[in-house]
Image: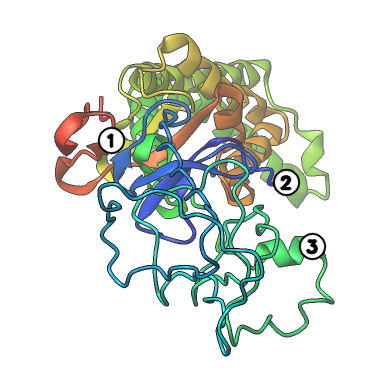
Amino acid sequence: MSSLPAGWYKDPAEPDTQRYWDGEGWLGKAIPADAVPPEGPPPVEEEPPPAAPASETPTSGIQATPPASTTPQSPPPGWGPQPPPPPGWQPPPGWQPPPAWQPPPGAQPPPGWQAPPGAQPPPGWQAPPGSQLPPGSQPPPGWQPPPGWQPPPGWQQMPPGMRAGMYPPIQARPHGFALAGLGPRLLARLIDILAVLLLNIVINGWFAYQWAREFVPMYRATIDEMANGGSAWDVQASGRMDGLLWAMLIIATLLWLAYEAPAIGSSGQTLGKRLMRIKVVAVEDTKPLGFGRAFGRWARLGLWTPAWGCAGIGFVLQLIDCVSPVFDQQLRQAFHDKTARTVVVALPPDDRRPVDATTSGGGNGTSHQG
């Protein structure tokens, strides 16, 4: 069983379409890859009533062969069951019963056709060349591989996990959008860091100047102490320096919060994300996150900023959080995305919107850019 949660994903057999995966198999019809799928699984379509089997009637012992034409024909007026053969009747010499009907070579079912529940393929049926089963599915009873098919080398020696890995990976498309790449996300974060740094220069400039005035005498005293054979640890920083450092870290944290949380809560985009055309959306829908949920997402990353004053522990934890999407192959979620149940998606170029599969006529769906 696949560990991938239920949702809409690219169809491995047809990469230009997407279908609904319920955790065990595919459901419903495929829709275009750039379409916005409906919420939840696709609606269940009514299956056409099965064709009534042809009634077998006693004849004179000779069975009629099916006509060459595929157009259904009705019996002539007045036709009915024939009387049984007379006692002692024997078929003429050399007579052979007609062979069982087989579908013509290369015949394919109509688009969207599904076999009725419990249906079994006819005896001797073989899959067309090049056909593949979706991951996790089982072939029907009596299924045979197409002629000439050979398993890959070492197939029997591979563990089940490696066999499943030979199928093409399923690429998640939350709400019809592609996941944002790691490169654009990194560039967007660097742009945001630069923006917050400029805010700190303006707001924290006075505190930085006062801290520098305390630091310069301490630095000179340290150099003199080391020149006289002493240790640099003999010179202690003043209490005012420690207070100024903590004040700058707290102000920097509040500036980062004011810059990121309201923007993510309202539109899902900061300045860096707008420039790189990526957006933060919820896992379950495309509605705005709101300030509370955006604050929870930022807090997992930003509240470690004051811990920079504790031997840089805060910086190390933030760095681990920022590189965590590399280890999530399904949704590329960072730790702060997992906390807020969000994903980062790439917006289509030129403000184009994916086609909304839930509207008639293939019209454009609702804008998700915010």
Query: At 33% from the left edge and 30% from the top edge, which residue is drawn?
Result: 270
Query: At 29% from the left edge and 47% from the top edge, which residue is drawn?
Result: 78
- Determine which quarter of the picture holds residue 312: top right
Q: Secondary structure at mark 1?
A: loop
Q: Residues within 10 Å of mark 1 (few under 14, many from 20)?
A: some
- Name the quadrant of the C terminus: top left
- Residue toward you, 153 or 126: 126
Query: At 43% from the left edge and 51% from the top edge, which residue is drawn?
Result: 181
Q: Which residue is mark 1?
A: 357
Q: Residues within 10 Å of mark 2 (few under 14, many from 20)?
A: few
Residue 226, percent from left and from top:
76, 48
Q: Amino acid at mark 2?
A: Met
Q: Which residue is mark 2?
A: 1
Residue 163, percent from left and from top:
72, 67
- Residue toward you, 151 or 339: 151
C-beta proximity under 8 Å, tags 3 and 2: no
Label 1, label 2: how far apart the Cα atoms are: 28 Å
Q: Amino acid at mark 3?
A: Pro
Q: Which residue is mark 3?
A: 160
- Determine which quarter of the picture holds residue 232: top right
Q: Residues within 10 Å of mark 3 (few under 14, many from 20)?
A: few
